[in-house]
Amino acid sequence: MHSISYERARDVAHAVELGSSPGSKFIGGGTNLLDLYKSGIERPTRLVDVSRLALNTVEELPDGSLRIGAMASNTLAANHPLVRQRYRLLSEAILNGASAQLRNMATIGGNLLQRTRCYYFTDPTFRSCNKREPGSGCAAIDGFNRIHAILGASESCIATNPSDMAVALVALDATVRLAGPDGERSVPIGDFHRLPGDTPQFDTVIKQGELITAVDLPPSSFGAHSHYLKVRDRASYAFALVSVAAALDLQGGTVRDLRLVLGGVAHKPWRAEEAENMLRGHALTPELMARAAAAAVAGARPHTHNAFKIELAQRAVVRALQVAGKSAGEGKGGAV
Ligand code: SF4
């Protein structure tokens, strides 16, 4: 029998102290951790409950940034008036991410730490999974890999990151604030999740005992022209086969600045910087968008069942750019 202790943290310092012991795991909403615990994939020896810490607010900082507490629910963040007004991309991504029931429970911090939905990872009857058991192999590489990565994968792991929210946060240049045994630090969201390399057991750069306390969003010039496009097998809450966060700063039809980030294609949100460079300073013509979309998937390495993602991602990039390029609230939806 697996024994486990439960302790409720009084404050952040107490949480860090409790969470620093090997085998400790923080629990907020528990929407992913409890599933993995029940199936034997996560085996913490101590659960540190951080759900009641005073980290559940959304506040504007003096420099105009927005700070979303790590314990804020996904619902609260997605529906907060300042998020909806200034960071509609984030609201769209979160609302695309899960059912209302899950969004009510799931926290912002937990969303960033959710684990891959690779079938071979979530089903312990499959023995080969380097992410679950380092050195055991990767059942997905020669198995059914329709949902897996086409970019940035390794010989050890071809899993994708499942978070919609993280894709939007990369497009919005967010920063993750952490408190840990060595003090506080901030990590740009683009550096927070990792590529698998030969250590796919680590999804992020977070260390034992470090607690996400908040996500900071800098003032954004992308508020009027952005779109989160998610392509999935069914409309009723499935994980992304491909998603695109397109955020544009337009001036008279010219792209002054932009972010283009793909989800569902890699072990982390995949920022398409080469494509951004092609579009910056130009009008969004069909030809240029098509070339940028091709650049966004440059270097893609498909596996047996997921080559379709290369074409799908390009179509999604073009569609997301088209919708983002229209005025706020216009032209949503449509075929990919
Ligand atoms: Fe495990 Fe990664 Fe391979 Fe999936 S892709 S089986 S998570 S090692």
Image (cartoon, helix red, strand yellow):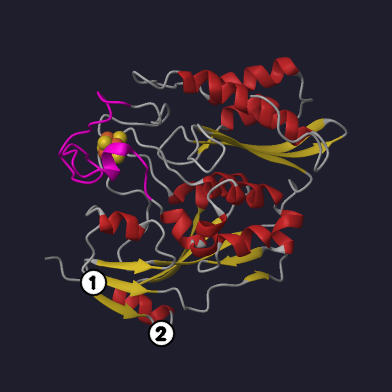
Residue 8 image position (x, y, % from top left): 36, 80
Left or right of residue 43: residue 108: right
Q: Nearer the viewer, residue 186 or 58?
A: 58
Q: Position of residue 38 (x, y in %)?
A: 27, 58
* Most foreground residue, 174 or 308: 308
Q: Quadrant of the C terminus?
A: top right
Are there few (<14), some (14-19), or many (20+) residues within 10 Å of tag 2? few
Near-viewer residue (241 or 101)? 101
Q: Could you tell which of marks 1 and 2 lies nearer the N-terminus?
A: 2
Report the residue marked by disc 2. 10
- Establish if 112 lies above or below 13: above
Q: Is mark 2 within 8 Å of ligand 1?
A: no
Tell me which residue sits at (73%, 62%) in the image.
82
Q: Mark 1 falls on what kind of element? A: loop
Magenta stretch contains residue 131: yes
**Mark 1 vs mark 2, CA separation in Å:** 17 Å
Is 178 displayed left or right of 127 in the figure?
right
Q: Amino acid at mark 1?
A: Ser
Q: Where 208 sits versus 51, above or below?
A: above
Residue 243 at x, y percent in the picture: 56, 35
Q: Which residue is mark 1?
A: 21
Decide: is 219 above or below 161.
below
